Amino acid sequence: MQDLEQLKQKLLDEAAEAADLDSLEALRVRALGKKGEITQRMKTLGQLSPDERREAGQALNQVKDALAEAIETRREALEATALEARLQAERIDVSLPVRPERSGHVHPISRTIDELIAIFGEMGFSVAEGPHIEDAFHNFSALNIPEWHPARQDMDTFYLKAESEDAERPVLRTHTSPVQIRHMLSDKPPLRIIAPGRTFRADHDATHSPMFHQVEGLVVDETTHMGHLKGTLIEFCRAFFGVDDLPVRFRPSYFPFTEPSAEVDIGCSHEGGQLVIGPGKDWLEILGCGMVHPKVLENCGIDSTRYQGFAFGMGIERIAMLKYGIPDLRTFYESDLRWLRHYGFLPLDVPSMVRGL
């Protein structure tokens, strides 16, 4: 027993002084492995009398348990030290661009939003944001969309569960127009904003997605008229697509929240089976617009006899697909790194009002 106490103290000292995990593992194998010192002593218990076997067995188990606990305690300490050393050695500034710079790519949607902000920013627009979950007033009623309108049906719109039987069901916003409503309710004219962001509709195919992105613009003051709307959108289309003589036309249309309303088409042609944006024989619709309906202004507490304005909206994925030749909307959300390397952009090449597009 005296020899066993000496062995116990010797092993515990070695465990406490182990310099690294490899040394600690070697000690465990030497003491507790199949051929370890403690294991070999356990095998000799059969040669003892029952009383001696019971006493020696209890003593050996105590040594075994004490050593196992000491090894585990030392292992945790060594692992913590190793982790701290690794954290110190691998510390990086996460605000810096990835290294190397060309290994990461900016998604085409993020790139397109930056381009939109840069173009409209030069025209004096500021960026406004709003919640994804809206109520019926901000998403529909304030925009002069009646209750019987198809856009308010479950087949087209995602509704959430109401808090109670009498409560109105919240809705995932179907456009970023609620941002315009909130801005008109909280700020006084003159107003000049764009509202880029996610929107949600119950549709899914090669050209539609249940979640997609829109950007909408709003100008409200005492002098704005249809000519300003046309000039703004013509300059935007030519700047975004990089075609100085890009033909742009306005076709009469209908939207509940604008009057008069128009669809905007840009010129294009099909050369060699490919779509080419620019002067040509064909036209391509890209966005809708119009003068803000007087009822919308009145719903937001703005005097429609004094103020007027214009609004427009377009799908960010759609214009990105046209500009960068992306054939299928669904690929935007498949998280395919090969696709991102092909269509993505370098992280340091960011459009801005200073650097341009």
Image (cartoon, rainbow, N blue to C red):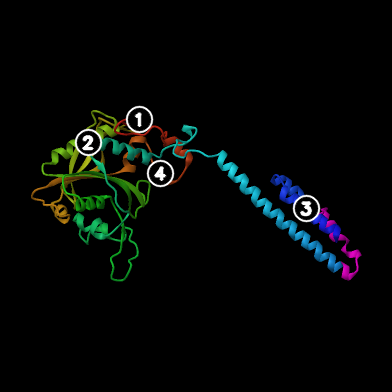
Residue that carries the numbered disc 2 in the rendered image: 123
Q: CA distance from mark 2 to mark 1?
A: 37 Å
Amino acid under disc 1:
Gly
Q: Give the mark toward the camera: 4 or 2.
A: 2
Residue closer to the observer: 241 or 80: 80
Kindly identify which numbered label has been placed on residue 11.
3
Residue at 30% over, 64% down? 169
Inter-mark Cα distance, 3 to 1: 82 Å
Residue 36 on image: x %, y %: 82, 53
Q: Which residue is mark 4?
A: 332
Judging from the image, what secondary structure is the residue with disc 2 in? Answer: loop
Quadrant including the N terminus: bottom right
Which residue in the protein does label 1 denote?
A: 272
Q: Measure the C-alpha gap from mark 4 to mark 3.
A: 61 Å
Q: Please identify the quarter of the rendering in which residue 47 is found.
A: bottom right
In this view, the mark in front (4 or 3): 3
* x and y percentages locating residue 203 in the rendered image: 34, 53
Residue located at (53% from left, 39% from top): 91
Q: Nearer the viewer, mark 2 or mark 1?
A: 2
Amino acid beneath label 3: Leu
Asked whether 283 falls inside the magenta stretch, the response is no
Q: Quadrant of residue 264?
A: top left
Graded by Cα atoms within 10 Å as few (under 14), some (14 to 19) or many (20 or more), the crowding at tag 1 reads: few
